[in-house]
């Protein structure tokens, strides 16, 4: 669906290398998170795909089309929800969506526009001018705008920045619905729990290079170094009992002990507990989140 080869982009006469030899291939129907710190190159990549920024070198194939030779055709396949909310405030919601449909030569798009407004809970704002919309409504309108031409690939550049929790959750449900309909989705976000909840594949960009590109579950499995344990012992532990735990910085609340432990120390921990003849009756294990793993990778 999307094949990127040796893609590079420099700004300021070559002084800033925003993308360095990026290679990437995304299949139809995938739901991918594109993660990276500020300035990593995410927006540059998205803007190249959207045709808003010219690449310096490399090739981009979108669907069957090459970005250089068939830019118009590639635009029909892609819908982009930009980071910046830039909407012409003189128009109404309906007009914005009609004008956008017109760019793609689509006439009489009213039925689909109504469906989009309904699903994005904007139906009652159809005739409202943009000036009267809240920030969250404007963000939803940007999503509707990106979808008017029914693109096969939807790219969202931080769509939930500054959006309240309720609205964020309803946007998540909507994205999941689109994913189920088979739309290929690429999501950039600084909310790592959002990426963990929604995406199946995680790509991490760091200083213009892809440093990780793996299925989410594998990334979490392969790069999580710690786990958190909550152990319920049969009795309250005295100072002597927990001395062997001190190296794990335990937090003791009555009979329960909380530990953050390196996976590689697990065997030793259980061996020590057996040697101390400490009886426990329950253990809760919390694995590292995508945020924990991500932070450990970008800090390397
Ligand atoms: N128009 C431009 N002119 C010069 N430099 C630019 C331009 N756009 C981006 N850059 C630089 O390119 C690099 C990548 O920026 P980009 O906006 O792609 O990062 P990002 O990952 O989207 O960051 P953020 O999470 O802050 O949106 C940065 O060093 C940035 O300063």
Image (cartoon, grey):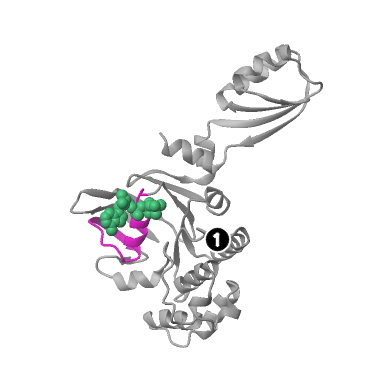
Left or right of residue 299, residue 218 in this image: right
Picture residue at 50% right of the left edge, 38% below the top:
293
Left or right of residue 31, residue 61 in this image: left
Tell me residue 159's x, y (percent): 49, 61
Residue under pointer 1: 163
Tell me residue 185's x, y (percent): 48, 60
| Residue 251 sits above or below residue 2 on the image | above
Quadrant of the drawing holding the N terminus: bottom left
Q: From this viewpoint, is residue 291 visible?
A: yes
Tell me residue 194's x, y (percent): 55, 52
| Residue 191 sits above or below residue 174 on the image | above
Picture residue at 53% right of the left edge, 43% below the top:
290
Q: Quadrant of residue 119?
A: bottom right
Picture residue at 60% right of the left edge, 80% below the top:
124
Picture residue at 52% right of the left edge, 80% below the top:
113
- Residue at far front of view: 131
Per the rendered image, the range of residues in magenta is: 39-61
């Amino acid at each position: 669906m999307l094949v990127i080869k040796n893609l590079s982009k420099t700004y300021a006469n070559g002084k800033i290398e925003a993308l360095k030899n990026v290679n990437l291939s995304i299949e139809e129907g995938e739901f991918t998170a594109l993660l990276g710190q500020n300035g990593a190159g995410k927006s540059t990549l998205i803007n190249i795909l959207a045709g808003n920024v010219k690449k310096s070198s490399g090739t981009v194939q979108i669907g069957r089309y090459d970005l250089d030779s068939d830019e118009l055709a590639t635009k029909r396949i892609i819908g982009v929800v930009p980071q910046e909310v830039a909407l012409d405030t003189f128009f109404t919601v309906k007009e914005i969506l009609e004008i956008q449909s017109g760019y793609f030569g689509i006439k009489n798009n009213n039925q689909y526009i109504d469906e989009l407004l309904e699903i994005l809970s904007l139906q009652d704002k159809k005739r409202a001018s943009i000036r009267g919309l809240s920030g969250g409504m404007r963000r939803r309108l940007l999503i509707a705008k990106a979808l008017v031409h029914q693109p096969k690939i939807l790219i969202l550049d931080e769509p939930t920045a500054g959006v309240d929790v309720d609205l964020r959750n309803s946007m998540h449900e909507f994205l999941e619905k689109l994913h189920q309909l088979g739309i290929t989705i690429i999501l950039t976000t600084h909310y790592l729990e959002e990426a963990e909840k929604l995406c199946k594949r995680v790509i991490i960009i760091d200083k213009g290079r892809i440093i990780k590109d793996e299925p989410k579950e594998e990334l979490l499995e392969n790069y999580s170094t710690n786990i958190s344990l909550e152990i319920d012992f049969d009795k309250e532990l005295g100072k002597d009992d927990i001395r062997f735990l001190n190296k794990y910085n335990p937090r003791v609340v009555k009979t329960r002990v909380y530990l953050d432990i390196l996976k590689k120390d697990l065997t030793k921990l259980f061996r020590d507990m057996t040697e101390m003849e400490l009886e426990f009756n329950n253990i809760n294990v919390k694995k590292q989140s995508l945020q924990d793993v991500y932070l450990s990778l970008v800090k390397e």
